[in-house]
Amino acid sequence: MAKLDQGPPNYKDMLPPVILENYGKWKYHEIPRPGVLKHVSESGAALYSVRVGSPRLVSIDFIRDLCVVADEYCDGHLRFTTRNNVEFLVSDESKLQPLLDSLDAKGYCVGGTGASISNIVHTQGWVHCHTPATDASGVVKAVMDDLYEYFNSMKLPAKLKMGLACCLNMCGAAHCSDIAIVGVHRTPPRINHEIIRKGTEIPSLVASCPTGAIRPDPKNKSVIVNEDKCMYCGNCYTMSPAMEIYDPKNDGIAILIGGKTSNARSAPSFSRMVIPFLPNNAPRWPETTEAIRNILELWIANAHKGERVGEWVERIGWEKFFSMAGLPFSSMLIDDYIFSRETFRTSASFKY
Ligand code: SF4
Ligand code: SF4
C-alpha cells in the first residue's frame, strides 16, 4: 500500500551541494547583471542564481526543457521563486556565461531582479475557475508583453510588484501589490429558485453576503436579493450555483495601486482602487495595458530613488496623483463599507 500522510519531500534532499555546505553562512549578495544574483558565503564559495520568467501555467514539456537545461549547467538543480519565476542554480562560474547564452538562444527571458518588474502573481481566470470576472493568463501575457523592457532591466525607481486576481476573492497578492488588476462584476446575481430549493443551504447563503442584501423567502423556499444593497461581489455564487453573476458585457477589471508587504522604509499597506472599471477586451486587453503603462511611467518620471508606488503617492498626495495621471475621480472610489471612516480626510490639509 502507498505510504500516506508523508508530507512533501524534504527540501534539503534537493539542494545543490554548495547551498547545503554553506547553509545559514551566507555573507552578502550582489546583482552582477539583471536576472543574475551572486551569493557569497563566509567560506568564499559563490552561487549564481539565474532568474528566468515563466508563464506559471506550463506544460510538462516546458518543465522537461527546464530540467534539460538544469542537467547541462547546474548538475540537475533549479528552483521556483515565490513569484513563479525559475532560478537555475550555478555553482561553477565557468558555466554561467554558457548558460546565459543557451537561455538566450532558446528564447527564455532572464530578468526580474532588483528595481525591475518581476513576474505577475496571478490566478486561474477562465482557464479553470468558476467565479472569475476576467481572465488571468491572457491579461498577464498582454501586460508583460507591453512592459517586458522593465523585466530584463533594473531601471525603475524601486521594485514593482504586480498581482492579478480574477475575482474579489483575491487569491494571491492583489490586495498588497504596487499595481493590482482585479476582476469585477457590475450586475447582481440571477437567482435560480429551482436550484436553491434542490440543494442550497439557505442560512449559509444569506450569511455569505457582506451587505445583508440576501434574505430568506420561506414561502418560495428560496431567497430574495435586494439589488439596491448588492455590490456584485459574487460571494453568494461561491456559496450556491443558483446565484449566477457572470455577465460578459458588464464584467471587467478594476486597477488598484500602492500596496506592499515589506516593512522596508514604510509599513506594509493595502492597494487602493484608482480605476473602477475597464472592459474585458480579450485577447489583448488594450485599455488595461495602457492604463498600467500610464501609471507606471508617471511613477518612473516622478518617484524618488527607492520609493515604491504607494510611498510616492503618499508623499505627493492622492489628489495630486489623480490630477497628474489624468484619471477621473468618482464616487466609486470613495470607501462606503463598514470601516470607511478611517479613509476619509479628517484634516483641512489638502492641495487645490
Ligand atoms: S481570484 Fe476568484 S476567480 Fe480567480 S482563481 Fe481565485 S476564486 Fe477563482
Ligand atoms: S453579489 Fe455579493 S453583495 Fe450581491 S447579493 Fe451576492 S453576496 Fe450579496
Image: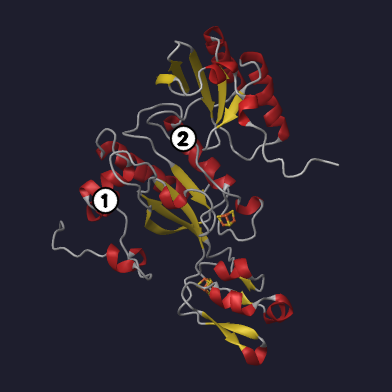
Amino acid type at mark 2: Ser
Q: How many marks?
A: 2
In this view, 25 is above or below 120? above
Mark 2 or mark 1, which is nearer to you? 2
Q: Secondary structure at mark 1?
A: helix
Q: Residue at 53%, 43% (x, y): give it.
A: 140
Looking at the rendering, in which quadrant would you find the C terminus?
A: bottom left
In the rendered image, residue 62, in percent from the top left (x then y), is placed at 68, 30
Q: Earlier in the sequence, mark 2 or mark 1?
A: 2
The residue at 54%/75% (across/down) is 207
Q: Quadrant of residue 20?
A: top right
Please give the label number shown on residue 321. Answer: 1
Q: Which residue is the site of mark 2? A: 118
Q: Amino acid at mark 1?
A: Phe
| Residue 272 image point, x, y percent | 36, 55
Q: Which residue is pictured at 51% across the width and 22% down the height? A: 23
